[in-house]
Amino acid sequence: MWGDKKTKIRKSSTGHFDTLISNKTQLEGDIHFSGGLHIDGMVKGTIRADESGEAIVRISDVGEVHGDVIAPHIIVNGTVHGDVYSSKHIELAANASIKGNVYYHLIEMVMGAEVNGNLVHHKEPVPLSLIHI
């Protein structure tokens, strides 16, 4: 997916991902971020975007999250063990594996992606401030 020219890779408003968690990193604890967050490593904790702006989190095919993910824009091509809350748009790539519920406004799901939980649609975008876990 990542090398495919047809794939749209969304970036933060600054044109790049501000924070990278490399595949050699294991982070334990909650993450609060703004801009763009790219995860190649393992995160054990909740990932929450700042309420203002158009934050995006991307979990690569080697990335793994054990906890909830909350952001306006989310791209998953790795594994999430927890619930995913996308207030605007979520993209599930071919290697995506979510073991939890997915709450979304708009969703793109490629053949091969899996969700072991409920898909819950919201007709209107949900402000992050209304998402409490």
Image (cartoon, rainbow, N blue to C red):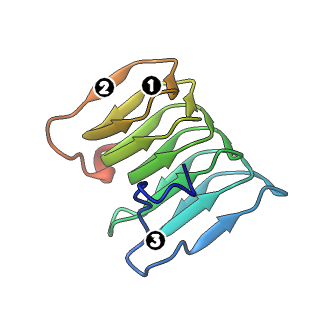
What amino acid type should be assigned to the residue bearing mark 1?
Answer: Asn
Residues at circles 1 and 2 in contact by the CB criterion of under 8 Å: yes
Position in image of residue 49 (x %, y %): 45, 59
Q: Which residue is mark 1?
A: 101
Which residue is more in the foreground, 10 or 12? 10
Instruction: Label 2, secondary structure: give it.
Output: strand
Position in image of residue 97 (x %, y %): 58, 29
State which quadrant residue 118 falls in.
Answer: top left
Residues at circles 1 and 3 in contact by the CB criterion of under 8 Å: no
**Is residue 102 rendered to the left or right of residue 114?**
left
Residue at screen point 44% across, 47% down: 70
Position in image of residue 43 (x %, y %): 70, 48
- Closer to the chain start, of discs 3 and 2, is 3
Q: Which residue is mark 3?
A: 35
Q: Which residue is mark 2?
A: 120
Residue at screen point 49% across, 40% down: 93
